[in-house]
Image: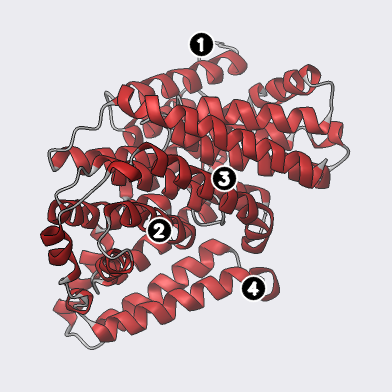
Amino acid sequence: MFGADPFWLSAGILIVTYVVIMTERLNRAVVALLGAGVMIITGVLSQEQAIRGVDFNTIGLLTGMMIIVAITRKTGVFEYVAIQAARLGRASPARILLLLAVVTALLSAMLDNVTTVLLIAPVTLSLTRELRVPPYPFLFAEILASNIGGTATLIGDPPNILIGSLVGISFNQFIIHLAPVVVVVLAVQCLMIHALWGRSLHATADDRARVLALNAKDTIKDRTLLRLSLAVTAAVVIAFVLARLIDLEPGTIAMLGAAVLLMLDNYHRRAEEQAHGVHESFTQVEWITIFFFVGLFIVVAGVEHSGVLGWFADRLTAATGGSQDATAYAILWSSALLSAVIDNIPFVATMIPVIKTMAPAMGGPEQLMPLWWALSLGACFGGNGSLIGASANLTVAGIAERAGVPFRFLTFLKYAFPMMLVSIAIAQLYIWLRYF
């Protein structure tokens, strides 16, 4: 437009988009879509190039898993798990604190971290009310655990979904390469949380007896749907594991699983009831996240097409002297620190094409694997560094504040940032030991 250099024009659009997202004055999906529109109308991208820039595998994976979780949620199984965790901990606040963190991490690995905290946080508030203990330590622990646990798998955290889909890394590879360090980091973080709060949490005998009296079986609302949901979820996870053998992408697997579960949940109803049931499931999809990804893909495609990302990759390679290990550490720490300041999703979406352009300097695409693991660990663990670092953080903060539990930015930062630095230090040690 007006003869503007696409390089600087696209860079300016990207920066303005990020800054407005960080201010939180406008919904991030709206901002991303506006940025995408400006990329097109200014001529940085054509409409065809913009559409090609959208990774529909990622969109399908996110949407399909959200539908599966929405249907499964109706069964009450997540409340069942939380109450069972409380009973396993004998209603001891300190034990429940650790058990809920572990449960959150496991669920985040198999679902995704935002969905997990949406399910766990309300139940946590109910349990802490019954025990009459402060809910903040529990919610804080669940935020950290959701981002740590989600790091272990392809589907656990949106940055991993992006990396897996855009780079072609399988479900199995994520587990093999990242699960070991995730277990270590989770254990260390749980110990730190116990030292901070666990030892000081106490409940009266009457309050503990009231929690132990809760019947977890009463939370199951539909046993038939529960069996169907668990069967479909298991089939989807198995298909993720076997994706290379069956030659299917994760997006296709998730959408097919969602379609099967929608059918099983509605086939016995009349036509009008089916329409209502399907509509109800679709309304549970986080469309803000979906359209945020669509807009973001187009914005990033614009800066990639104009050469900005190639320029940045050349500078990063020059700064590290082309050394694979130095580049990995630089990506790990820069990803962590920047993900604590900005949402890790747009950062990772920008960095993926940057790292791809380093392949010739590093000796080929296969030499980039340590860099992908560094990006994942830095972005996912770094999301714990501040309240705005990851979507799960803001989700829990919103739930807590609606329940009258204050979630202040600086208070969270004071505890979370040092713990995040510890996790990144462990990740660097792991990368050094395993890959260099």
Q: Which mark is residue 2?
A: 1
Task: Return the disc, 1 or 2, that comes first in the chain's sequence.
Answer: 1
- Tell me how far mark 1 sits from mark 2, CA to CA: 39 Å
Q: Position of residue 119 (x, y in %)?
A: 28, 58
Q: Secondary structure at mark 4?
A: loop
- Which dot marks residue 63? 2
In front of the other: 321 or 211: 211
Rendering coords of residue 97 (x, y %)? 33, 52
* Secondary structure category for the residue under label 1: loop
Q: Are marks 1 and 3 in contact (CB under 8 Å)?
A: no
Label 3 or label 2, whichever lies nearer to me, is 2
Secondary structure at numbered mark 2: helix
Residue type at tag 1: Phe
Q: Is residue 97 above or below residue 15?
A: below
Q: CA distance from mark 2 to mark 4?
A: 20 Å
Label 1: how many residues lie within 10 Å, few (<14), some (14-19) or many (20+)?
few
- The mark nearer the N terminus, 4 or 3, is 3
- The amino acid sitting under disc 2 is Thr
Q: Quote the CA–CA distance across marks 4 and 3.
A: 27 Å
**Residue tagged by mark 3?**
52
Q: Earlier in the sequence, mark 3 or mark 2?
A: 3
